[in-house]
Amino acid sequence: MKADVIVIGGGTVGAAIAYGLAQRQQHVIVLDGDDRDHRAARANFGLVWVQGKGTNMPEYQLWSRRSCERWADFSKGLLDITGQDLHLEQKGGLVFCLGDAEFEARRTTLQKLHNQLGGEPADCEMIDRSELERIMPGVAFGSEVYGASLGHRDGHANPLRLLSALHAGIQRLGGTIVSATLVEKIQSNSSGFTLGAGLENYVAPRIVIAAGLGSQKLGALVGLDVPLRPQRGQILVTERFVPILPLPCSGLRQTREGTVMIGATQEDVGLDAATTAVAAAKLSTRALRIIPALATATLVRQWAGLRVLTPDGCPVYAQSESHPGAFVALCHSGVTLAAVHAETIAQAVIDGSLPSSLDVFHQRRFDVPEAA
Ligand SMILES: Cc1cc2nc3c(=O)[nH]c(=O)nc-3n(C[C@H](O)[C@H](O)[C@H](O)COP(=O)(O)OP(=O)(O)OC[C@H]3O[C@@H](n4cnc5c(N)ncnc54)[C@H](O)[C@@H]3O)c2cc1C
């Protein structure tokens, strides 16, 4: 099979780029691996989020901000093409602080992030408990809740609807998704790339490696060595309630259907996506310190997924120097960044080069000489 562009990986990152390519009249094929693969896209919390991003790279903060600004149009475009409502809300988002020490530490972190951007107006503010109670009149907060940071650009969406709409959008726009197809070989010659998956070959002048944790192995075949590590995140889900949380919070978010999601852990346990009682206890304990009434909630689900993390936690976008036409796209905020992936990254693949504003995200930043 031949295409203008082949995207390897049909998770949120690959699907968003493929959707953007299809919107731009490219004939795109998505090759998506096996159901037993680790799939971060099916495990996430659904935040469309800026606050706290980019402590070591201000450009990541700006990139997240830009994507959040584009999300409403992006979501509307998917609705128009597929009829699927992504349940997007962007009315702000909270990070709760238990005690004054957490509150002050949060203030300092956000102030540093703000200072990195020079004269830009602040995205976030610290709010005290009484303001929190005013914003969330339906919640009786625990006695330790001191206040919160409020990110004005933050929001949330339904991540499974996003993935489903992206897949539907790609196909409505003439693209092809080939599931259960693990790319094992990548060969290149002057006219492009031949990808081997099982007995089939797929040919295109451009390829995008967006295979999550599978990208490290594939990237090495075309000179795009990206160090990656998995980080486990576990999430709990309660039964449905009437709306009580008008804003999503990092750690607690009420879905449009009424369930409350509690999460997510950050665990370095390698490629282990098991759920544990320890994590359930830890997540529940903090949630109850914030909203004690959740103690009587019935938990209906617990799941775990593996985040796709680079050494500094920031995204990687690069084109191979040894194999021009081969791109890689990786991040651990695939929902937040879906809008810029569909717009800027898709356009860059068509143009044959990434804009210089994205140089900072090249993986060469990890090429540090070994100590003698
Ligand atoms: C617990 C948790 C909470 C999260 N919360 C948020 C959040 O609130 N907001 C947010 O923005 N992000 C969040 N994320 C991150 C988000 O889910 C990921 O950024 C995103 O899903 C990564 O998508 P991906 O497409 O890179 O990888 P994946 O979803 O892992 O997809 C990779 C795909 O590549 C395929 N593949 C692998 N190897 C091959 C191969 N050789 N050939 C063909 N296909 C291959 C796999 O089958 C898979 O379908 C969270 C993640 C986790 C785990």
Image (cartoon, rainbow, N blue to C red):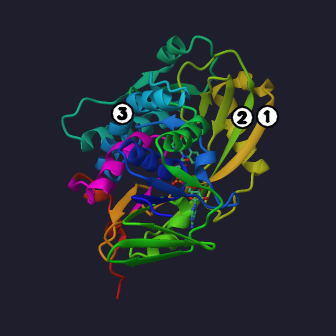
Dot label at residue 70: 3
Q: Residue at x 41, y 37 (%)?
A: 51
Mark 3 and mark 2: Cα distance apart in space: 29 Å
- Counting residues from the start of the chain, the first of labels 3 and 2 encountered is 3
Tell me: 118 left or right of 349.
left
Q: Nearer the viewer, residue 341 or 252?
A: 341
User: What is the crowding at mark 1: few (fewer than 14 residues within 10 Å), some, or many (at least 20)?
Assistant: few
Of tags 1 and 3, the one toward the viewer is 3
Mark 1 and mark 3: Cα distance apart in space: 34 Å
Mark 2 and mark 1: Cα distance apart in space: 6 Å
Give residue 104's position: percent from left, percent from top.
Answer: 43, 35
- Counting residues from the start of the chain, the first of labels 2 and 1 encountered is 2
Mark 2 close to ligand 1, CB under 8 Å = no
Q: Is residue 91 above or below residue 201?
A: above
Quadrant (top left/top right/bottom left/bottom right) for the C terminus: bottom left
In the figure, residue 254 lies in which quadrant? top right
Q: Amino acid at mark 3?
A: Arg
Q: Amino acid at mark 1?
A: Val
The residue labelled by disc 1 is: 300
Residue lying farthest bottom?
372
Of tags 3 and 2, the one toward the viewer is 3
Residue stretch rendered in magenta on the structure: 328-356
**Marks 1 and 3 close (CB-CB < 8 Å):** no
Q: Amino acid at mark 2?
A: Val
- Counting residues from the start of the chain, the first of labels 1 and 3 encountered is 3
Q: Residue at x 43, y 39 (%)?
A: 105
Task: Tell whether position 360 is magenta.
Answer: no
Give residue 159's position: percent from left, percent from top.
Answer: 57, 38
The residue labelled by disc 2 is: 237
In the figure, residue 359 lies in which quadrant? bottom left
